[in-house]
Amino acid sequence: MKHPYLAKLALPLLCAGVSVSSAYAQGTGTVSGRILDEKGEGMPGVTVIIEGTTLGGSTNSDGTFSIQNVPSGPRTLVLSFVGYTTQRQSITVTTGQNTAVNNFTLSENTTLLNEAVVIGYGTQRKQDLTGAVEQISEKQFVKGQVTNPEQLVQGKVAGVQITTGGGAPGANSQILIRGGSSLSASNSPLIIIDGVPVDNNGLAGATNPLSLINPNDIESITVLKDASSTAIYGVRASNGVILVTTKKGVQGDAFHVNVSTQQSIATVAKYSDVLSADEFRELVNTRGTAGQKATLGTASTDWQREIYRSAYTADNNVSISGNAGKVPYRASGGFLSQQGLLKANDLKRFSGALSLTPVLLDGNLRVTLNVKGSWIDNNFSNQDAVGSAVTFDPTQPVQVNGTEGNPFGLTPAQLAAYGGYTEFNNKDDNGVVSLNTLSPRNPVGLINQRRNRSTVKRSIGNIQLDYKLPFLSGLSANLNLGYDIQRGRGTTFVPATAGSDFNRQGVNNNYSQDLNNTLLEAYAKYERTIGPGRAELLAGYSYQKFENRSYVFDDFRADRSIFAPVSLSYSGEDTYLNTNVLLGFFGRLNYNIADKYLFTGTFRADGTSRFNPDHFGYFPSGAFAWRIKGEDFLKDASAISDLKIRLGYGQTGQQDLGTNFYPFLANLSLSNLTAQYQLGYNADGTPRFLRTLRPDQYNRDITWETTTTYNAGLDYGFFGGRFFGSVDFYKRDTKDLLNFRTVAALAGLSNGGTFNTGSLTNKGVELIANVDVVKGDRLNITVNANATYNQNRLTKLTGSDSPNDVGQLTGGIGGGVGNTIQVNTVGYSTQTFYVNQQVYGQNGKPLEGVYVDRDGSNTITSSDRYRYKSARPDYVLGGGANISYGGANLAFTLRSNLGNYVYNNNRASSFYDLSTSGFVPNRNREVLNSGFSSAQYFSDYFVENGSFLRMENVTLGYNFGEMVRKGTNLSLSFAVQNVFLVTKYKGLDPEVIGGIDNTIYPRPRTFTVGLNLGI
């Protein structure tokens, strides 16, 4: 007999076999029964477990099951199958006997059928999707110590590249979906948390606003990638959309308490390859001047090990869920205390969340209430110490001790000027001592003599009402009221004796920022059968208001005397409020014919206060999907469980220019401190200087970028859903790029401004594959993989498409003033390196100052630079596996970028400089190989292959079941993050935002022990 549900994508829960531990050797019995569908036929593959234990299995081909060695006494039997309503049945097990339960009938649940996937303004069955949508649930998340939500899906989603900005606690991340679509505007996706679109702007005192969200509260993350799925968000959707859904209570569920703790130790995975003290002495004594040799000390200091430490993290969480009467609820609280590798760097986060999801009025009114809050205390170390530890003289001691570290013969009073920390000085012929401002600062002093602390608070919440209107069957109305409030406050203090701010006599400053985000959205949805199919029509309105209030304070010295007046008020504090309002009207039509032919059309009209009110954007999309599996010729094909072709087209917009709030309005800005005029005198007789107002460049016709996306996809499933995935081909054409460009003299109010200039294209392929290699009662092995190929090309930049145009120089580097190493040129990828072609000697070593004369002028000039490689990877790969045997589980995640190149700014600075006076900087070990005595910043010798393979995490766990007491669940896990890195790159880490490596805060290798108790 054929069973239609065998074709569904059913992945039974991992469960153990029938054997049990010696704890259950006595007092056990057997439980057996049969599971039927609504037609009375036996259902194979249904998961049957004894709640709170690892005992259970799957039903046989006729729907029967038998569970051996079940401890005697009252038990709860749990029956589950994807697409069907889960059932619980109370039973009593008798020692030595079989407990036969009556036949169970499972009924289909249309919400769960083929997995419910969150989409824009609602949910949809996975089998009904027409767009490129990928949802990652909690079971698939990256395990271990995760501080920021985006780290949960790093390497898990095809087409998504997530790069952290270093290893600091709560560090910011760059998220690119299908390559990004902007140059000067934001490339960040729109992020929506429980129906509330959040602000992409940063908050003072928080390196990453997403770090204010507790990852333990997240149930799933859905990525909308093509225009047919994102166009309903209109002017903000060109870079993709990420939907974050948090955990909630379940109707009818019993009371549960879950307590978890993770204890972690993080270590430095790799140090920068610089010269040791002995190697440095040999280099200076061999190649240095007499004055440089005189600066050498007698110490042997490893500055990197002086500033880094083994860092400890504790992450504790508790949640309760259940039903208060007919009101499902979930409440949680968390405390994270995380140390950074850099000394004096730490983060403390207190978080809480509450959700209520009652269904009222006989099931006609669904209410969803979400409230989340967090409080973070940051202690920021001075990250200048990271670069200084690489370049500071390793022969100097951390602190001055007698004559050690005193090459100038300074007096004790002079030595104590920097709080006792070794700093390089100048001493003129008259014996006057001054700080050598060209030398690096003492790395330990940078940390210990600076205190930068902040307190940031955030609350996100909304109430959503979904009401089935009684006067027309199939019609419902939805109202969503939400908010996102953020507050950032901080202080920075540096004593007057600190070398970092010695000449300005220290720092004693405040910083503050308030962000308010309010939302009102309403839509109506109408469902009915029209002709041969089922139609769903949605139409709505959206209003969102963003307020950014920044506080500007005077710049103070350590003693609170004014170093530079910044504000205009007498109080020394000014407040600036910038407001952005978005209005949108949107609609969507889904039409389903016999679950085989699926049509989707969306439309959104948007207006934004960033641009001229006469401009309104219109963003349409359309998609079609053919479920070939639903056709008669495949219905009975047991080898094929799913086969669907998708085609989509649509347009989306981009309006996020960061802090450039009103580029279409004429505006006046306050001059900088060097542009002041004297006007009279103050009461104390000192001259009074006033800053002037100057007109800014503006563009009345500026408007949003528009991205047109074409997508063709194939969803597949074979062998009863044990091998499934998708293939997508896409092309994204972006025009009217929001780009900063120069203007001709007298043609504007400035030498440059932001205009709609240029276009670019991203095109590529995404592959997703999931395989249940072994699927048994005790042993289960699941493998998953994703791959993305993306090609990025500029097709227009400044109105001239001449191949002879250099393009737009970008990518600033350390060394020199205003030097850049990248260029954006028509016909090439963005972030392409623009360098000289190095010439090598017979020994294979680079020849200093010798480059290929590419233009044939017999002189090496900027015209000889050429475009060489790009920071953008050609391929982004991810994958992993999950292996379980009984109660044991092993999982790992791998990530890889291929074809990306990195400019190694550290190596490019590794030359022996004979011109330095009073100090000699340490260098990368490259100085011993190249032997350069002058800067060769533009040599392609320093552009390195940054391809890598990183094992992101490995997790080993064991579920002990009811080890504590009946009805409880206890599990233990051990995880390692950043396990290993395979790369040819010679620097610290090839995964660098923007492709320019100029010393980054190292990513830690973290070891975590976790304990989870469910009651």
Image (cartoon, rainbow, N blue to C red):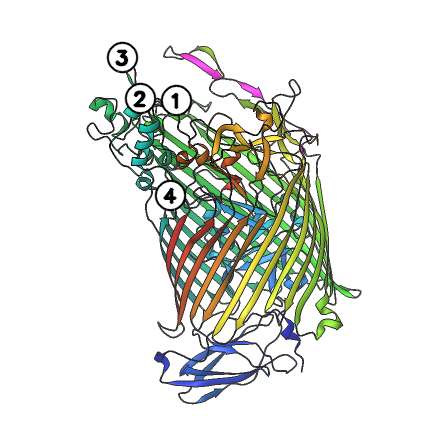
Residue 29, visible in the rendered structure: yes
Circles 4 and 1, Cβ within 8 Å, touching? The answer is no
Residue 120 visible, this angle: no
Q: Position of residue 617 (x, y in %)?
A: 70, 41
Q: What residue type is labelled 3?
A: Asn
CA gap between label 1 and label 3 equals 23 Å
Q: Distance between the residues labelled 2 and 1?
A: 10 Å
Separation of residues labelled 4 and 1 (CA atoms): 28 Å
Look at mark 1 in the image and give the residue it sits on.
Answer: 915
Which numbered disc flags the more N-terminal residue, 2 or 3? 2
For disc 2, the marked residue is 291
Where the N terminus falls, by quadrant?
bottom right
Looking at the picture, how far across and down is residue 412, in whole percent?
20, 24
- Dot 4 or dot 3: first in sequence order is 4
Amino acid type assigned to the residue bearing label 1 in the image: Ser
Instruction: Classify 10 Å Cα crowding around label 4: few (below 14), some (14-19), many (20 and above).
Output: some
Disc 2 on helix, strand or loop?
A: helix
Q: Is residue 373 above or below residue 839?
A: below
Which residue does the image show at 53% across and 71% down from the upper left?
774
Crowding at dot 3, Cα within 10 Å, few <14 / some 14-19 / many 20+, comes out as few
Residue 914 x, y percent position in the rendering: 38, 24
Three-letter amino acid code at disc 2? Gly
The residue segment tinted magenta is 681-704
Q: Is residue 688 magenta?
A: yes
Extreme front residue here? Answer: 842
Separation (CA) of disc 4 from disc 3: 42 Å
